Image (cartoon, rainbow, N blue to C red):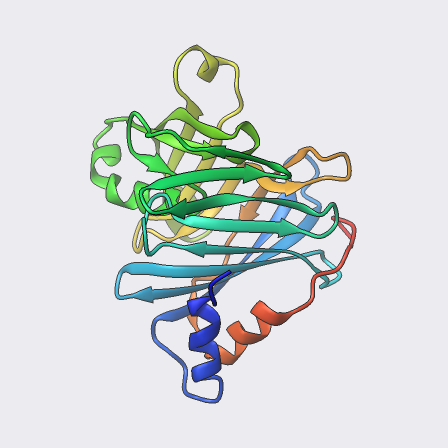
């Protein structure tokens, strides 16, 4: 595995000043029905101006134990970045890899070549970039099609995202959007709802199926709130997050 650019940057400047292109944001994932805190997501995002380069995510139980980590590399594609997710509670892994012009997706022990999509290919956190690029069209009421990578299915599925209107989260004005499967399945399959700050287009709330699984291996449905805006941080924090050991813990405790 090639060295992570994130880690190289961290090692090069661990004792240096805060970098303007390195930001941190944290989200709280709560059960959709009960509101119980299930886990926290901590994101470190390195960017070049408005273009994201890499993202590191730590997933922590409420106790503080880190149980999963995700790395996202946007350098080959902003909407369909390479990513790797690992959860030590069940030794589960999933992600997307690229080799030359080809790409493959994996889930657990299964790996499948990713055929050329019929529309714009979107994977994982690349959905943020897709949505921001189509913001004006969506706000004008024009639904946008996309092919979203679903590692558990070993392929990309046709989805459609549309505006769900303007709302407020506390004092924050937000634009809301809904992602649903395209075609007949969209009428019965669950949707994914997101809310973005109308001022800076940053994600403030996610509601739907996550890539974290419960004790039975089922994908957790949660509402993830990013209450505070991203802030600049020093690279030493990123170095620590990349090296922190993962351990088993129980969601919600």
The answer to whether residue 149 of the structure is visible from this angle is: yes
Residue found 69% across the figure and 48% down from its top: 38
The answer to whether residue 233 of the structure is visible from this angle is: no
Relative height, residue 14 to residue 35 (above, below): below
Residue 108's spot in the image, x, y percent? 64, 39
**Name of the residue lying farthest toward the bottom:** 15
Left/right of residue 111 with respect to residue 184 in the rendered view: right
Residue found 71% across the figure and 45% down from its top: 36
Q: Quadrant of residue 132?
A: top left
**Name of the residue lying farthest toward the top:** 184
Give the number of marks: 0
Residue 125's spot in the image, x, y percent? 43, 47
Q: Nearer the viewer, residue 92 or 200?
A: 92
Q: Nearer the viewer, residue 211 or 86?
A: 86
Left/right of residue 63 with respect to residue 189 in the rendered view: right
Residue 1's spot in the image, x, y percent? 51, 60
């Amino acid at each position: 595995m090639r060295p992570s650019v994130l880690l190289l940057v961290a090692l090069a400047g661990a004792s240096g000043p805060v970098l303007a292109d390195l930001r941190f944001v944290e989200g709280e994932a709560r059960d959709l029905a009960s509101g119980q805190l299930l886990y926290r997501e901590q994101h470190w995002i390195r960017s070049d101006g408005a273009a994201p380069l890499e993202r590191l995510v730590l997933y922590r139980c409420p106790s503080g134990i880190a149980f999963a980590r995700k790395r996202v590399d946007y350098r080959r594609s902003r909407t369909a970045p390479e990513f790797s997710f690992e959860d030590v509670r069940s030794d589960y892994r999933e992600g997307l890899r690229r080799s030359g012009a080809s790409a493959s997706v994996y889930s657990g022990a299964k790996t499948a070549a990713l055929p050329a999509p019929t529309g714009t290919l979107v994977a994982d956190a690349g959905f943020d970039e897709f949505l921001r690029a189509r913001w004006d069209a969506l706000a004008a009421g024009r639904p946008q099609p996309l092919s979203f990578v679903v590692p558990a299915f070993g392929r990309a599925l046709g989805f459609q995202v549309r505006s769900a209107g303007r709302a407020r989260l506390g004092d924050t004005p937000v634009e809301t959007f809904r992602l649903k499967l395209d075609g007949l399945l969209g009428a019965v399959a669950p949707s994914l709802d997101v809310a973005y700050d109308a001022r800076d287009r940053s994600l403030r709330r996610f509601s739907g199926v996550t890539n974290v699984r419960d004790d039975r291996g089922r994908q957790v449905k949660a509402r993830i709130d990013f209450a505070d805006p991203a802030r600049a941080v020093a690279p030493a924090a990123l170095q620590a997050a990349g090296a922190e050991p993962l351990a088993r813990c129980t969601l919600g405790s």
